Amino acid sequence: MNFKKKLLIVLALIAAAGGYYYAALPAINIHSSETWFFVIFLLAALAVVYAVRRKLDRKEMKQSKVMKFFGVLILCAGIVYLLGSLLSSPIVNAKKYQKLLTVKEGEFTEDVEELSFDKIPLLDKGTAEILGDRKMGSMVDMVSQFEVDNIYSQINYKDNPVRVSPLRYASLIKWFTNRSNGIPAYIRINMATQTTELVKLEEGIRYTTSEHFNRNIYRHLRFAHPTYIYGELSFEIDEKGIPYWIAPVKKFNIGLFGGETVGKVVLCNAVTGDMKTYDIEDVPEWVDRAYSADLLVQLFDYYGTLKHGFFNSILSQKDCLKTTDGYNYLALDDDVWMYTGVTSVNGDQSNVGFVLSNQRTMETKYYKVEGATEASAMSSAEGQVQNLKYKATFPLLLNISDEPTYFIALKDDAGLVKKYAMVNVQKYQIVAIGDSVSQCEENYLELLFSNGVKETEQDTREVKKITGSITKIAQAVIDGTSHYYIMVEGSEDIFDISVVDFIDIVRCEVGQEVVLEYKEDDRANLVMSLKIRESRGGDLEPESDD
């Protein structure tokens, strides 16, 4: 074979290897399974080319030293991969896997504060997608060119739970006609108020998952760091609203392929493509997701099932705990925590506790609270509205009056939230339903009192007394009951008098002198006793004097 043919073969091999690398983007790292597959594929391709070039038949291939050499290399690579997989597995490293995650026991009422309604994420990802599509449909100048990506990362933005997702090109043709300016906006949805915004940018997003060639975010990251093995990317915005891609870099702590955690995080500006790499402990606080929820769940399952070794986790399963199916997110201290229930491997429809894991730091806390599984709570909530056929979303764990409580949104067939439910974790027969969050909470608190879970707090407020003429009077109906609100000469306070309790208040008018006994309250002082005096000094109401 002449030199030109040899050169063409070499160039063809280089082109094939380059094409594979450009399309598959394997990390050049011994900890990457894709690297080993690429090496085996390349050796096999070289062997085939050699056999074709030499026109070897089956007998000659068996006798050829070169083919034997390729066979030995392929066999060695395969053995190294298989042995590496085995020696990296929990079968021989159960103790190391069990210690990958440090878990502390927490106190629920101390660690999880009661949230105000404007901080509770009421929507799940499915509903967020519906709202995002509706918002995009109203933007007539963009809807024909772009659509919303389905990423919808949940983050904390300026102390509010939001989901953010970039737009993407509607088709290959739309990419070709718009790529010079990039993607002009992203969607931001407040999960508490359900406010949906299309945030337009001064400069378009040029690095996304919907880009092609070198501006595709995966290819952009790979060419910048050929040896990094990336985890699941997320889309976030910093406190100024600038979009970033958060790319966690995997760290393998056990053997070649085992004990996956996160060692570094690459932040890539989605507009400019500028990148900066941080060690995991130095990641900026505005970043909410370095560890994916799936990775945190897997790490806790290792922690919970491998306490007494691998074979115990398969056979007797003594003291084995595992996470329940599904998870949700909770915003605490401007971080996003992954929440999931914990149940016994041999357990029934009950949880032995639940776990919270910080998605930025991997800090994990376990809470011993026995109660219903999330699936049981969802069924209980759906049972309250079975005539409406609403479907429950995966619960969010809240602290309601110091009680661990599942908060559940109930959606109709169109995927829109219609009602809310609160289910007590420990007594899941206590289920409250409401058209609003405040109504749902009010109904839930009433059930807690009526079922003896909570006792009515003793009113220790001091009873005070005031005498004076009425300077202002107004009437209102509160929860179907008439109330009179009055102000008395010499005081700036407002006094609340229920008609049900004090019918004689209807006789009063401005200038009337009254004697009130009351307890101070935030909005209006609550009147406990009322006496009405005539101008001559006598009492209209024949009450006994003190």
Image (cartoon, helix red, strand yellow):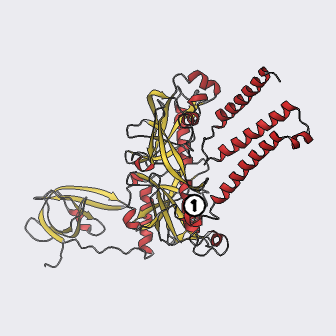
For the residue pair 183 and 478, the one nearer the viewer reads as 183
Answer with left or right where residue 257 lies relative to residue 490: right
Query: In percent of the image, x 35 and y 74: which residue is there?
Result: 456
Please say if 462 is above or below 246: below
Query: Residue 162 in the image: x percent, y percent?
Result: 45, 45
Instruction: Give x and y (percent) for residue 409.
Output: 52, 55
The residue nearer to you, when weighing 51 against 270, is 51
Front-most of residues 167 and 358? 358
Q: Residue 182: where, in percent of width, then height?
A: 52, 26
Three-letter amino acid code at disc 1?
Val
Residue at disc 1, secondary structure: loop
Tell me the residue at 83%/24% (across/down). Answer: 1
What residue is shown with label 1? 385
Q: Is residue 193 left or right of residue 59?
A: left
Q: Which of 201 and 399 is in front in this view?
A: 201
- Kindly identify the residue that appears in the image at 45 percent across and 49 percent down: 280
Quadrant for the C terminus in the image? bottom left
Left or right: residue 171 versus residue 245 is right
Q: Which residue lies furthest to the front in this view?
A: 65
